[in-house]
Image: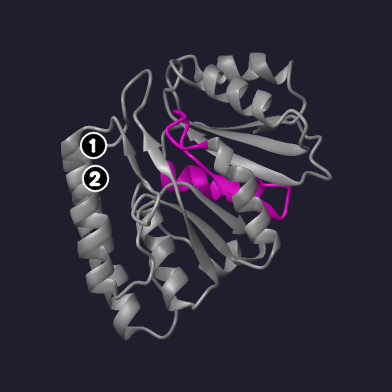
Amino acid sequence: MIKNSKTKGFDFTIIIPAWNEEDMIEETINTIENYFKKRNFELLIVNDGSTDSTKTIVEKLMKRYSNLRLINHKKNLGIGAALKTGFKNASSNVIINMDSDLTHPIDKIEEMVDMVKKGYDVVIGSRYIKGGGFREVPLFRRVISFVGGFIFFRTIFFSRIKDMTSGFRAYNKRIIKELNLKSERFEIQLEISVKIIKKNLKFKEIPIILNVRKKGVSKFNYFKELKIYVPSLIKLFFYRWFQKEDNL
């Protein structure tokens, strides 16, 4: 169910998937709304089956912000499913997806929007180009991200994208359908990266500093997600090198 339907004329849409984010969601929404208070934008929260008070908090804030919309999944379907729901329901032609915990730098959003409007299909916030990096993120997370996202994935897919798993991106809405996304969980960012390369889309990476989460806990479980990542990785590998059609 979609709530708040005044959706015409927005300059850009920010999509935030949220699952049990009662510790952060109010601060995240208020921070974004205050930062962009002079811009005509849409903030779309996809509540992915939260069992805490995430939904209630967003509904309360919707009385304050007319550009804030809420879509609820009845059960937790995964961040990939939440993003696809957001993409499908976004009102504007420029779409940004970001995490719900303010680890992504919102001061980069206007630059990303401008670049999409200038003709890029996708703009990627990258931790692995000059000027990018991490702030106070635990070492083991940085090592896993670097070895997997920067070295391994780039090598096997022969990718020009340096940050293959970045969750901070801007899109021209017209290319979302062309991506034909299948992933339901965290592997969706890797799928998007592979399809950007395979379809020869026009992309640009800009440097970002990924911050540590202030409150709550990360929902990413490396061992649990690995079981899903491996089969998806195999499918994407064959798609990248041996398939002409996108029939993942």
| Residue 213 drawn at (x, y percent) | 36, 26
In the picture, the disc for residue 225 is 2
Secondary structure under tag 2 reads: helix
Quarter holding the C terminus is bottom left
Quarter holding the N terminus is top right
Res. 180 in view: no
Asked if residue 205 lies left or right of residue 11, the reply is: left
Which residue is depicted at the point 53% across and 73% down?
Answer: 201
Secondary structure under tag 1 reads: loop
Please rate how many residues cluster around mark 1, counting C-alpha atoms within 10 Å: few if below 14, some from 14 to 19, many from 20.
few
Residue behind mark 1 = 221
Three-letter residue code for mark 1: Asn
| Residue 203 drawn at (x, y percent) | 52, 67
Q: What residue range appears in magenta?
A: 78-105
Three-letter residue code for mark 2: Glu
| Residue 119 drawn at (x, y percent) | 66, 68
Q: Quadrant of residue 61?
A: top right
User: Pointers 1 and 2 in contact (CB under 8 A)?
Assistant: yes
Asked if residue 71 lies left or right of residue 105, the reply is: right
